[in-house]
Amino acid sequence: MDALHPLPHPSVLAHVVDAHCHPTDSPLSPAVLSGLPHRICAMATRASDQPLVRSLAEQFPDKVIPCFGYHPWFIHWISLAPPNALPAKDVHYQTLLLPLSEPEHAPLLPAFHRLLPLLPDPVSLATIVEDLRTNLSAFPHAMLGEVGLDRAFRIPFERPAVPPYASSPAPSHPPGHSHDAPEPRRELSPFTTPLAHQVAVLEAQLALAVVLRRNVSMHAVKAQQATLALLARMRAAHGSAWTALSVDMHSCGLSALGWAEIERVHPNVFLSLSTAINARSPAHVALLRAVHPARLLVESDFHDVAYSAACTWDMLARAATARGWWLEESGAEVEAGRMLRAGHGDDGQAMAKAEEGWGAVRRIAENWRVFERGGHTVLPGVKKKRDKKKLLLDSSEEESGGE
């Protein structure tokens, strides 16, 4: 991987939002957090880090957008049974991980008995949802995240980590840094969390997001069709209440064609990419070119907040290169683009012309504003219904161009 793009002036970074990161995964420095030149969306993933994210948002309200949710890697710990009828630990995990008859699952029994003592006692989904409700309600701008589906993850043979999860004697470095060392390989069990269980836990969290009208940061790995089906169900079940909130497909690994299918049908779904995950493959360039410019966000997806600005800026610069956008060098240039657009009032054609001159920072800052506001009825960035067909055609043409 190439070195990260050099950072711009802090006045430019002030317009940048890291749409997805994990600052509580590493030891936190108050000096670093108070000195951040940009805003971050801080993700929670399991019970032990929900209070950490909450505390971070309370200490740094101008820097941190708290995101509360349960990641698919940790939802085998969750039981669908009510709190007063929780199954015993062995029953819960055996029912979830060994649902077959005894002769069929017999070869997996040694692995199961080795794994079981390492797993925590199950907690009820109802308890999880109420905890989410409390945290989300405490912050009017909080998001649901990180939640999602993952068909590739296998449960490791290890006890749940104690936060900060990424702490180690060695310093942390951003992706592509010359001092990067390979992650130690964990021994994985043969067990995965069944998709039906993942969907049940995810839909319960999303239903709460609909009730509270909270935006969502969504994880999806090896689950393209399941994600498409989920989005369709949510839209059918909740209608305008669903499209009122925004959904970010974070570190999106969908193909350009898969993304185009989502973009055409779901006006409230955005895409964000990260250097840490997406830049590992050249396919991210095709995805950057395929997404409509009004749907694109950027993120670090990094565990050390000290590198949030560098990693997020790197992806923004990559997006600019892929799309042929210019990069602003000062906050005044970013603001000039905003003022130029604002000066056209309700004149849709004049506003569109003004947007053609926007730099990459102004474009993505505007996308974040639309994402945060929600209330989607047509494609974000479209002011008149007659423009929608042309917008979709333009997106299709860009996608077919490829790299």
Image (spheres, rainbow, N blue to C red):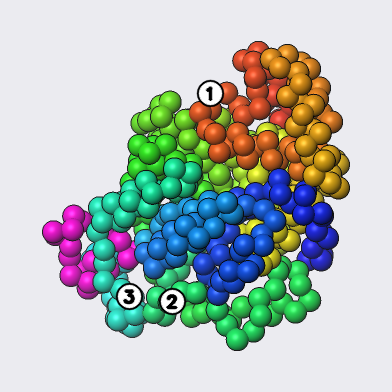
The earlier-in-sequence mark between 1 and 3 is 3
- Is 156 located above or below residue 337 in the figure? below
Q: Which mark is residue 161?
A: 2
Residue at 18% x, 70% y is 88
As drawn, which residue projects farthest toward the left?
84
- 188 or 102: which is nearer to us? 188
* Magenta stretch in the rendered image: 76-94
> Residue 287 at x, y = what percent?
70, 45
Mark 3: which amino acid? Answer: Leu
Instruction: Give the x, y percent position of residue 244.
Output: 47, 30
Work out how far the residue at label 3 is from the one at label 2, CA to CA, in angstroms.
Answer: 11 Å
Residue for badge 1 = 377
User: What amino acid is found at the position of numbered circle 2 in the picture?
Assistant: Ala
Residue at image mark 3:
119
Which residue is located at x 32 percent, y 65 percent? 77
Image quarter for residue 332?
A: top right
Kindly identify the residue that appears in the image at 38 percent across and 39 percent down: 212
Total number of numbered discs in the rendering: 3
Residue 86 within the magenta-colored segment of the rendering? yes
